[in-house]
Image (cartoon, grey):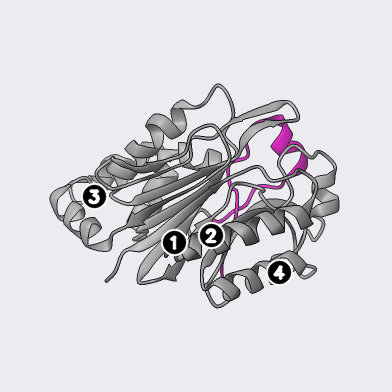
Amino acid sequence: MTSLHTALLQSSGRPGDVAHNLRVLQDAAREAAATGARLLACPELFLTGYAIGGDVHRLAETADGDSARAIGKIAAEHGIAVLYGYPERAAQDESDSTAVYNSAQLIGPAGERLANYRKTHLFGCFEREWFTPGERAVVQAELAGLRIGVMICYDVEFPENVRAHALAGTDLLLVPTAQMHPFQFVPESVIPVRAFENQMYVAYVNRVGAEGEFEFVGLSCLAGPDGVVRTRAGRTEQLVRAEVDPAFLKESRADNPYLHDRRPELYGPLT
């Protein structure tokens, strides 16, 4: 099984301008594919911007909407899978068709929709005002022989969430995020620990710079199951790349006993 060359697009695009952000994604996909990347991950709410207030509802789309089709064409053109964050409008056949979710969708290299995840843990008054929380903790897809999991930003700060992915066999956890000052310790410290304690790769891809009342800290990274960061961005817009090596992951899981040594019968009080 060959490594999955993975690219992280650290960018906030242009808040409120979907067409511009699609062009940024197109350029990033072209550049990433030219270097051999087979997966491009973008930040939380990359499609629309994060601090856009009431425009969340105006710009929200269904999972199979115009932007999903546009990104499918980009993915197919460059032969690269794409994960992007966007505000998702519930489909008409759902019980609450007016709901909007903070979502991330994985598009395959042929342009097919592979997975769609709705953020389960909303952060702060801003998100709770505009979004409905998702109800499905573990969302996965198969890509290049790996089991890919998806969650969004604050979700990864709950160890139970990531452990659920580990127990479900996630090899690479994609975490689009909008991490802000003063919480830079999350990409610096929490993410490598999550990767190590759960024996998986974790790709954490952040927004960067000022946006409304927020200051996003960048520091996107891809950490391995040994807790070592394979690549890390700084505090500017960047495209960084690293390998997700399934052979190394297999060796690491054989050497690290965390999941084998668990005693679930003792953990009942956690729930």
1 or 3: tag closer to the N-terminus: 1
Quadrant assignment for the N terminus: bottom left
Mark 3 crowdedness (10 Å alpha carbons): few <14, some 14-19, many ≥20: some
CB under 8 Å between discs 4 and 3: no
CB under 8 Å between discs 1 and 4: no
Disc on res. 259 = 3
Q: Nearer the viewer, residue 155 or 53?
A: 53
The amino acid type of the residue labelled 4 equals: Ala
The amino acid type of the residue labelled 2 equals: Glu
Q: Position of residue 181 (x, y in %)?
A: 58, 24
| Label 1: element kind | loop
2 or 3: tag closer to the N-terminus: 2
User: Disc 4 designates what residue?
Assistant: 70
User: Disc 1 designates what residue?
Assistant: 35
From mark 2 to mark 1, how far is it between C-alphas? 7 Å
Q: Position of residue 254 (x, y in %)?
A: 15, 55
From mark 2 to mark 3, how far is it between C-alphas? 38 Å
| Label 4: element kind | helix
Range shown magenta: 113-136
